[in-house]
Amino acid sequence: MQPMQAPAPLLELRGIGRSFGAVRALDGVDLALQPGETLGLMGDNGAGKSTLTKIIAGNFPPTEGEIRLAGAPIRFDGPAAARTAGIEVLYQDLAIAENLTAAANVFLGRELTRGVGPFRVLDHAAMNRRATELFGELKSETRAGELVRMMSGGQRQAVAIARTRLARCRLVLMDEPTAAISVRQVAEVLDLIRRLRDGGTAVVLISHRMPDVFAVCDRVAVLRRGRKVADKPISASSPEEVTGLITGALEAA
Amino acid sequence: MRPTLLALALAALLAGPAFQANSAHAQTMRFAIVPKGMDNPYFDLSRDGCMQRAKEIGVECVYRGPAQHEPATQVQIIQDLITQGVQGLAISAADADSVVGVIKQARDAGIAVITFDADSPNSARQAYVGTNNLEMGRELGRQILKVQKQPGLYITQSGGPSAANLNERLAGLNEVLQGAGWTLAPGSPSFCNDDAALANQQLADQMQANPNARAVAPIGGWALFAPEAYKGFVNANRKAYDSGNLALVMPDTLPVEVELLRDGYAQTLVGQRPAEMGAKAMDLLLALRQGKPVPPVTYVGLDVVTKENAAQFLK
Amino acid sequence: MADSAASAAGFDNVRAVPWYRRGFLAEQTAYATLALLVITTLVAVLAGNFLTPANLQNIGRNFSYIGLISLGMTCVIITGGIDLSVGSVTALVAVTCMLLMRWQGTTPLAGVPYAQLVLPILLGLLLAGLIGAVNGLLVAKVGLSPFVTTLGMLSICRGLTYVVTQGRGQAPSGPYVADFLALTNGRVGGLPAPTLYMLALAVVLGVALRHTAWGRHLYAVGGNETAAMRTGVRVARVKVGAYVLCSLSAGLTGILLAGWLGSAPANLANGYELRVIAASVIGGANLAGGAGGPLGAVVGSALIEVIRNGLVLGRVDAYWQDALIGLIIILAVLVDRLRTRER
């Protein structure tokens, strides 16, 4: 898919750096993402992938650099702010509370309520209905009212994915979504990514699995020791080249 | 589900025999004696005195109080004893005001109520039996003057700042000693919260801070309830004690304390008579039930134990 | 919802959850309630005067104090925390309220109708709230361990209680003593006031936990704090709220106890923290966080009180009481463990 003609990219990172004490986790990373584009973000453990994800998701601010959303500089003061701006995250650990129901997890942090003024109660029916719909769209046999503790790995994945589809979002960050599920479920996730792309949602796929990235991504970016060492169309790269970039056998591409 | 059944079976097993074992006596009169806390060995003596006297006069004595010294729990237990239908109550008030309401409740239910050891003067209790604490404090002071002629610094210790009886004892002690030219050591009294281990540490600390102190006179026997720790404290000050420059006059005459005295770890003990209080309590309650007049306040005497008469307290 | 395991498709391999692991029966509280019923029946059969109205009144009032604090404690435990300071907060608030009552008589406020009744109570509760806020901020914002923080607070509050009272018990005073006693220890429709306060609070808390976003966030924080943070739940605020609520419940209890006893002794509620935690745990609150509820807190407190009362009425050797309650605590967590492991 060709990069779209747009006045400004959906998301643009300029010179992002992040230090944790003496540790330099990210250093001068530039990255641009067009609407509906699918980017594979790759790198070895500790290369800075998850730090970058957390900065985009509003978990913490960068030490230096600028984030622009549709051309305008933006600063998130928390995950809720990033979500309001249309950025959803699918965390590797799924970020679900096992002691809550599937629907409660889907709506966690943005519960539907009804009532007047400060006296607002949860709208259980509406949330269950919407969650059931989402599970239906995901072709998942997950019951909205059941505790996540009772659920299989695939159902939990569905709960976490349903959460990213709750609001119309512009960008979904997926942190290793295929790491811990069966082959058949991997196909479902990849299919989902394609559907998101077709719907105009941009996706950043963080993955160790080369075949997944090459199956669905338009572009691939590689991080090594906190720096971006490559950023090119998937069609112009190869698994061998990316492996070399990740390990450092290739300096840059 | 099975674990629940197991739990229930266990509970029934535990509770069943215990309940039955105690439901035999119906006709004899039943008096309850309620200590401030059952964790205090002092009240064991009251219990024993009470039990023995109860047997002699043909009544039943129930000993029941909060596991640890706490006013609200004590009131709850007294309520339960009222419900249980005892005929008389002897209460050592954990807090003088807290028991006022429940004592009225008991009286309204036709139960004879007296206080022992710790009074509740504003309540509807019919009598009080206990130590004259002011007099006990004075006696401690007089005994110090006997073994230590030359006035100086003295160290003392209390169980806590709240107990009225302890504060009275302190007043008595201070009255006699300061009247004879003695000075209270800075940092005295220390408060040990009825904790025997802490009591010993505090005594040691105070001696450390005032090495020239000429008397150690806590107003309760807490330190001696941990005999080995107390021996350590005395041995650390052995030189002053053996040369007659340090008076160790201790309250109470529990067996463990008398043994310490016999073995040379104190010159004098001034004892309350908790067992006599327990026994007197039974007499008073029986008299009240029989409609006989009783004095509003009964003081039991004090025992003064020295090496000479220690043997008779160890029988 | 009740459909059986249909064709597994998509992301899952569905299995229907057996009936005894769903809904109310899936909760520890159900077992605690059952145990309460059985033990109550046992005591009623074995101890003749258990079912007298006066005794039931006593039990109702007695367990309300522990029950009230357990409601607050349950909130803290749901977040995965613990509050050891409740017993001494109870005492500090009780004596503060009494002292304010007396002190206000010497100020111009003495002329304002009911000020000498209302202000001490409100200021006492304010103090409780502040203590809770300090606990909560130290735990949630500074990241101190709840156990150590509240252990320190336990000592601070008990110490302050002795400092301000010099160890002397404080009695309610002023022109509104009768109103104060009616408010704290009156009776409405045959029920003791403390019981009504506890039941009312339990209902409000029950609704709040189940039907508000705040309640849901409380469980989320206890279930998976990281997940709650990542989904935008204001974790620190939720935690501070729980500690404030817990302290408030302890403060209210202190005021009610002072009314019932007609006195606020400095050693009031000494050791209550352990009884409160025991009641919460028996009722199904999980110290690991994420589970518990008001019904459990009430049932757990009632269970402890019925055992205590039953042992006195049944004339069982008093030394047995603590051992029996300990046994029940361990059975409670044991049943919970066996039940959740049998999959």
Image (tube, coloured by chain):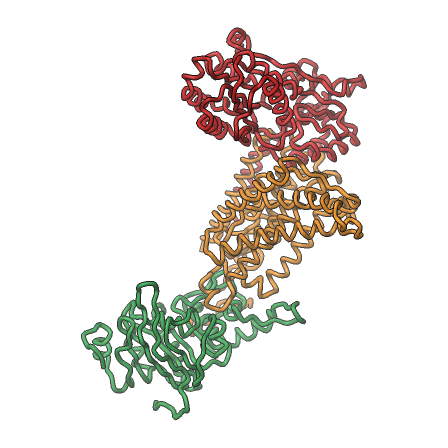
**Residue C25, quarter of picture:** bottom right
Residue occupying the far top of the picture: B308
Q: Is residue C250 left or right of residue A232?
A: right
* Residue B20: percent from left, percent from top: 63, 29
Q: In this picture, is A8 found above or below A43?
A: below
Quarter placement of the C terminus of chain C: bottom left
Q: In this picture, is A170 found above or below A25?
A: below
Of residue B202 and residue C92, the one placed in the foreground of this image is B202
Q: Is residue A186 left or right of residue A225?
A: right
Q: Is residue A150 left or right of residue C244?
A: left
* Residue C241: percent from left, percent from top: 57, 58
* Residue C275: percent from left, percent from top: 57, 42
- Is residue B277 visible in the rendered image? The answer is yes
Residue at 20% across, 77% down: A251
Colour chosen for chain C: orange
Residue occupying the far left of the picture: A249
Among the chains pictured, the one given red colouring is B
**Residue A1, quarter of picture:** bottom left
Q: In this picture, is B115 found above or below C307?
A: above
Of residue A83 and residue B14, the one placed in the foreground of this image is A83
Colour chosen for chain A: green
Q: In this picture, is A184 found above or below C160?
A: below
Of residue B193 and residue C21, the one placed in the foreground of this image is B193
Residue at 52% across, 77% down: A133
* Residue A237: percent from left, percent from top: 24, 84
